[in-house]
């Protein structure tokens, strides 16, 4: 690893401790009123917003380190169920945009209930019961980052719907994220995977981004030995499919 890269990664890494202190501080102010005194509704609102944004920053720090790790080709396979992977990713996504849905996702007891909650947000979940309960062996942090980025894009660029499909076939996991938005003309199918590239900059979407998500997704998918397919055309929505080989059971 280049010396400069190590120094940057170390700086990012060292952000974790002060962020954890901020997180713990705000959380205890909110949770332990008997110790710190009662809060007004307005104070609670401000603190909750600060906490949410601390969590966003923590997630970003994690993502930044994961990308660095990935470019070194380091994989950390572990065993987990598809249901844990999807639920955890959805909680992370909705924690930032709609904490109500995030709470509901956390409290769902089964696939049926989860489908119902997600339908309320225009998100379809297509996975069969057997795959849902199945245990797989993969680098969970990386696959979660991939899923989170693709879902965030689809939710950001959709008109009204997103479909998430998950399938296990021939020792590989297929994850598709499809939306009904403006789509991506074929001339842009390679460019959107370049760092900092955005098709229409900010005017396309009120939510700001950096044009980094898909470049990161590509690095992570390749490092997992996988492939990414894009089906899309102008005005026809977009469908990103990731195929990653499952690591053999150890
Ligand atoms: N589902 C989609 N529908 C239409 N355009 C998309 C979609 N996903 C990505 N794009 C286009 O590809 C560009 C690059 O996507 P990418 O995820 O890398 O960046 P971003 O979402 O703009 O910012 P961020 O760095 O926050 O992810 C986007 O700016 C957008 O123009
Ligand atoms: Mg993005």
Image (cartoon, helix red, strand yellow):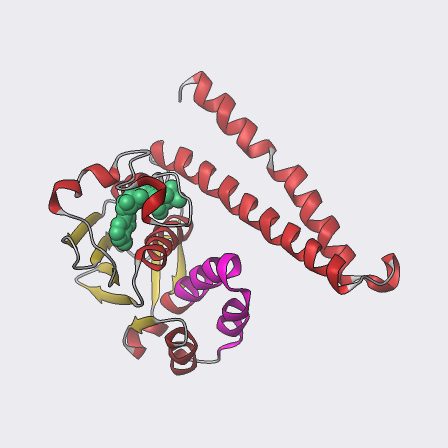
- Could you tell me how many numbered marks the image carries? 0
Which of the 4 quarters of the picture holds residue 41? Answer: bottom right
Q: Residue at x 41, y 33 (%)?
A: 68
Residue visible at 40% across and 62% down in the picture: 85
Up the image or down, 115 lies above or below 170; here it is below
Instruction: Tell me the quarter of the image containing the N terminus.
Output: top left
The x, y position of residue 131, in whole percent, is: 29, 72
The quadrant holding residue 134 is: bottom left
Magenta stretch encompasses residue 85: yes
Along the viewing direction, whichever of 191 and 243 lies nearer the viewer: 191
- Residue closest to the eye, 15 or 84: 15
For the C terminus, which image quadrant?
A: bottom left
The magenta span reads 84-108
Residue 139 is one of the magenta-drawn residues: no
Residue that protrudes farthest toward the bottom in the picture: 112
The residue sitting at 12% across, 46% down in the picture is 186
Residue 111 in percent (x, y) is at: 39, 78
Please indicate whether residue 234 sits to the left or right of residue 107 in the image: left
Q: Judge from the rendering whether residue 216 lies leftward or rightward of residue 37; answer left or right.
A: left
Q: Is residue 162 left or right of residue 51?
A: left
In this orientation, does residue 209 appear?
Answer: yes
Q: Position of residue 175 (x, y in %)?
A: 26, 60
- Tell me the chief SS of the magenta region: helix
């Amino acid at each position: 690893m280049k010396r400069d890269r190590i120094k940057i990664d170390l700086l990012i890494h060292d952000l974790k401790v002060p962020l954890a202190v901020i997180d713990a501080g705000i959380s205890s102010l909110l949770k332990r009123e008997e110790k710190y005194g009662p809060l007004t509704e307005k104070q609670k609102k401000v603190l909750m917003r600060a906490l949410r944004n601390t969590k966003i920053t923590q997630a970003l720090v994690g993502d930044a380190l994961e990308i660095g790790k990935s470019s070194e080709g380091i994989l950390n396979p572990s065993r987990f169920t598809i249901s844990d992977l999807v639920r955890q990713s959805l909680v992370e996504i909705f924690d930032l945009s709609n904490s109500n849905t995030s709470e509901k996702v956390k409290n769902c007891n089964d696939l049926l209930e989860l489908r119902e909650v997600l339908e309320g947000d225009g998100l379809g979940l297509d996975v069969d019961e057997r795959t849902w309960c199945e245990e797989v062996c993969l680098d969970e942090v990386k696959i979660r980052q991939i899923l989170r980025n693709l879902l965030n894009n689809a939710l950001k660029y959709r008109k009204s719907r997103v479909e998430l499909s998950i399938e296990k076939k021939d020792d590989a996991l297929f994850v598709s994220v499809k939306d009904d938005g403006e789509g991506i003309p074929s001339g842009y199918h390679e460019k959107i995977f370049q760092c900092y590239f955005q098709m229409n900059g900010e005017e396309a979407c009120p939510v700001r981004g950096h044009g980094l998500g898909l470049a990161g997704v590509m690095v992570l998918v390749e490092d997992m030995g996988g492939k990414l397919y894009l089906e899309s055309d102008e005005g026809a929505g977009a469908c990103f499919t990731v195929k990653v080989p499952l690591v053999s059971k150890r």
